[in-house]
Amino acid sequence: AQEGGAFMWKYESPIGTMFIKSVNGRYGLFFNDELYGTWHSPSAAADDVYHHVTGCEEWDSLDGLLPYEPSDLSEWEEF
């Protein structure tokens, strides 16, 4: 059950590129080649990125400090 037919999404964040991609039927959040968890949908993963509750301390510590961040999956780049 992909969304929009995509299998992978990316966000060029201020700390580096984040990816959401399919992992064994779920969707994982990758940053610096590390997997920070899996979600039931890519939208759920993107939502946790927006709310800075990813488990990636480098990202989560920036909550409220960035001028822009994608508020939902539609603002990530599909590829």
Image: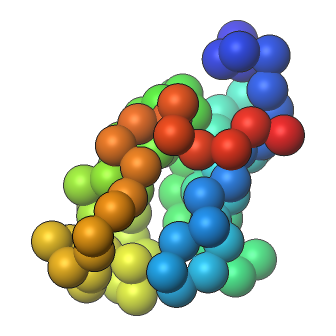
Query: Which sits in the foreground, 67 or 57?
Result: 67
Query: Which sits in the foreground, 59 or 56?
Result: 59
> Is 72 placed left or right of 2 in the picture?
left
Residue 76, placed above or below residue 33: above
Rendering coords of residue 29 (x, y %): 59, 57
Q: Quadrant of residue 68?
A: bottom left
Residue lying at 24% horizontally and 55% vertically, measured from the top left: 51
Residue lying at 84% horizontally and 40% vertically, measured from the top left: 79
> Is 36 placed left or right of 32 in the picture?
left
Rendering coords of residue 54 (x, y %): 39, 63
Query: Which sits in the foreground, 10 or 45?
Result: 10
Rendering coords of residue 40 (x, y %): 52, 29
**In the rendered view of the protein, which quadrant contains the N terminus?**
top right
Residue lying at 40% horizontally and 87% vertically, measured from the top left: 58
Q: Quadrant of residue 32?
A: bottom right
Residue lying at 71% horizontally and 15% vertically, measured from the top left: 4
Query: Which sits in the foreground, 40 or 52?
Result: 52
Question: Farthest residue in the front direction?
Answer: 67
Residue 4, placed above or below residue 78: above
Residue 18, placed above or below residue 4: below
Rendering coords of residue 35 (x, y %): 64, 67
> Can residue 39 be seen here?
no
How many numbered tags mark residues here?
0
